[in-house]
Each structure stands twice: as structure tokens, then as C-alpha cells.
Image: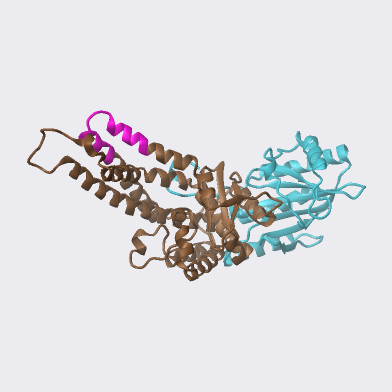
Amino acid sequence: MGFWDTLSGRTKPVAPKLDALFALPSASITLQAGANFTMTGRGAVCFRPADGPAFAQTLADVLALLDADEGPDVEQSTDEYGFTWLLARQNDMGALVTDLHAVTTSLEAQGFGQAMLCALVSFTDPSGRSLALVYLYKQGTFYPFAPAGQQRRDNVLELQTRDLLKQDLPIEKDLSRWMALWGAPGL
Amino acid sequence: MKTRFVPDHGLTARMTGAMFVLGLLFVVVIVGLMLIVRGPFAIIIGLIGLGIAWYQWYASDSLALRAMRARVVQPHEAPELHAIIDRLCAMADMPKPVVAIAYTDLPNAFATGRSPSRAAVCVTTGIVDRLTVEELEGVLAHELSHVAHRDVLVMTLASSAGIITGMLLRGSMYGGFGMFGRRGGNNNGVPVWLIVLLASIVVYAISFFAIKMLSRYRELAADRAGAFLTGKPSALANALTKITGDIAAIPQRDLRAAEPMNAFFIAPAVSGASWKTLTSTHPSLEQRLEQLAEIATQLGRPLDGGFSPGPGA
């Protein structure tokens, strides 16, 4: 925030960053080659629904857009903090990222860019461990999230994944931003 | 990017006006002192005043948390509270503040700290018990907006003229105006110390009202930014209604104990009568609800025409 914004008590809404999202397909290959994690085909976007008819209409348009193709429909759910999740299924990472990207651009075009929180794509390995790469829209960075049972994270796996992917993806450096997303759709 | 965030120019203008008055008062006090006081006293008094303001700002987080007997909580102690703040900070792209809980039934929340990277947000157990998750999120978004707007810094600077005149007034009580003696100057006229005393009272009174005014505008600005961040002005409105109603219902004695902290609270803990609108640190509930309703309208309106397509649109 600039000097004048501070003085006048005016926070500028932060625009979601999108470019890094398209690095996911190559990261997915690295993850498979380096750690034997394969994509599950599920990806989800999380955002804060706004009050009022404009947001409801925008959301309905997004759902119609994503459901226009063949294949399974997008699932919508609300978590315990009141955030909306849209879960998309695609067998190809490129197509999945395109879906996630479409949600953001549609919301942004209606002035709801500030509502974006994060997106995630999930992976699994032959031993059944699950891993998600979470994209923080406002920071434009990724972090790994590996749930291991009830409210516990596999921190070792997360740090290994960070080291493996740091060439492919911009990784969030501030570890306190690595939010736990318990029970997120798509995991 | 296309945004629904519409700045309130009227609010900005009124806020700038109040800040201008307070800045002017500071200059007037210093210049006045330089004219009246012999030697380097004026500069020294000014520096001491600024020093006190600086200390209040620099140590604001620990001072405020100690005054409220608040305890800093780690994520595993208050996972839900931390999760709400994590998400808000990620959406607003700001550093996460320290999270604290004050064990009192008074439903309130405040933010403090010298900068966004060294800030603390505190909620009372009373507010956590009374509000739903979404309402609590609205309140926390309001507090985080205070942090982003550096309200502790702004309010402390704004009160520096008041601090200095307060020092002068207190000094006059202890007969500290010996230094104002201009011997042989104007024997027939009013004594200099009386002029200083009267001027100090006037300056103090003006700065008192201007600070309260500025505080109310900063509250409205924080409401505004918080409501746009969560996209749910209705949740903040519900929370404010609940808290204000609850506070009015709680006996006075508890409330006065919390009075010095008022400027940083989400809702004031004192209920006054007719003085209220002028001397209150917070705008009236009606005023806040009105602004939130306006934001809800802006959020609900479709955006079309007149805008060039945003990136990727």
C-alpha cells in the first residue's frame, strides 16, 4: 500500500495472479518422475462467495461454462469457513488447469477477483499417500499439502516435494502461509 | 483488474480534513512554544511529546496486549481462529499478525502493532462465544484492515499535538511555567502563563474532537475494506448488531475498566448520551450499518458496459 492509500485508509484489493498456474503440467511430470506421484485428475478452486445477486449469477455462468464439455460435472461445496469450492475432474493436467483458470477469469471479469483464495490439484502414490499442490492466487506461489490422517500433515513429504519442484514452480517461501486445508474437495 | 471496490471520496475528504487540522495543531503548538518560551525548550518539549507518541506506537502491541491481559495463542490452541486469519491474510496478501485471546466476557476485538509485519489481533472469549464463524470473520477482516491502514501509527501521530498540550496543562498544575517568565515585558497586560494555559486548553479541546472524528472515519474505512475483503457486508453488520446490543446490556463497572483501550476496539465499550456523536471513537451503529448496506448494493450490482475488458476477460 502506498503512502496516500495508508493515509486515506483505503486498501486496494489484490488482483489474483494467474501466470504460474500454467507451470503445473510440467511440475506434474517432474513429480511423477521424481517421486512416483501421479495426478488423481481432481482439481479444485476455493473462493469467498460475495453477498448479492451479481455473484450468484456469475457463479451460475461459471458452472454452465465448465459443464459445457463432456465428462463429469463440476461439484460445488461449501466448507466450514463459508468458502466455496468447485471441484473439477479432467484426465489431462492441461485441461484441468484450463478449467481452474476459467473460474478465475470469469469471477475477475465481474469484479470478484479479490474473492479468490487458492486452487489445488491432487496427486497420489502407489502406497496410497496423498499430496496436493496448492496455488495461492494472491501470492502467485505454490505449496505442497500432504494430509496424513486426522488433522496431521506429512511435513517431510511436503519439504521433499518443495525441493523437488523448486525448479518448476514458484514455491511459497513463507512457511506460515502453507495453510492446512483439511477435508478440501479433491484430496 | 476490474474491481467492485469503490472508494468513498466523501469519507476520504473528511478524513484528510481531520488529519490536516491535527497536523496544523501540532505546528501551531510548536511555533507558539518557540515564540513564547526562551531557549531551546520548545524543541525539547516537542521532542518529548513526539518521543512519548513514538513509544506508544513502537510498543503498542505489547502495551495493548498487556493492558487487556491477553494471551498469544498458537495455531494448535485455537485452530479455527488461526484458519480464519490465515485465509483472510492470504486473500489480502498481507503478513499474518500475532493472534491473541483475552479472557473476558466483554464481546470485543482489537488490532494493534507498529506495522503490518509487527501486528497483533486480539479477540475476547466473549466475542468468539457469541458470533458465528462468518460473523467472526467479518470482525477479523475489519481488524486486519486497521492493520493494513496502519491505524495505530496514524492515530498516534494525530494525537501528538494533544499529548504536548496535555503535558503543558499538567505542567501548569505543578507550577512549571516559571520558564515562561518574560520579565519586564508586558506588566500591564495578561500574564504570559495565562495565555499559554488558555491556548493549551483551546488546542487540547480542538485536538480532542478532531482525534475522535478521525477515529470514527478510520473505523468506517476499516468497515469498508473489511466488507469488500470478505464479500459479506451482511456478516459484519450482524456481528456489529450483536456486539453493540450485548455491550449495552452489560453492567457499567466492567466497561469502565476497559475504557482506555476504546480507540482500538471494534465497538466502543462506553455508552454515552448526547455527547456520544461528537466524542465517540466509533461511528454510530446506524451509520455503520448504512455504509454496509451500501456496499452490499455495490456487490450485488452486475458489472457491465463502460469498462474495458480486464486481462484475460
Q: Which residues are magenta?
A: B29-49
Tell me the quarter of the picture where residue B28 sits: top left
The residue positioned 67% from the left and 49% from the top of the image is B74
> Where in the figure is residue B207, as x and y percent of width and height?
32, 49
Q: Residue furthest top?
A: B39
Quick check: is B30 in the magenta stretch?
yes
Tell me the quarter of the picture where residue B102 sits: bottom right
The residue positioned 28% from the left and 34% from the top of the image is B42
Query: B257 and B135: which one is in front?
Result: B257
Chain ID for cyan:
A
Chain ID for brown:
B
Q: Is residue A54 left or right of residue A118?
A: left
Query: Of helix, strand and loop, which mostly describes the magenta segment?
Result: helix
- The reply to whether residue A101 is visible in this rendering is no
Quick check: is B135 in the magenta stretch?
no
Query: B76 and A103: which one is in front?
Result: B76
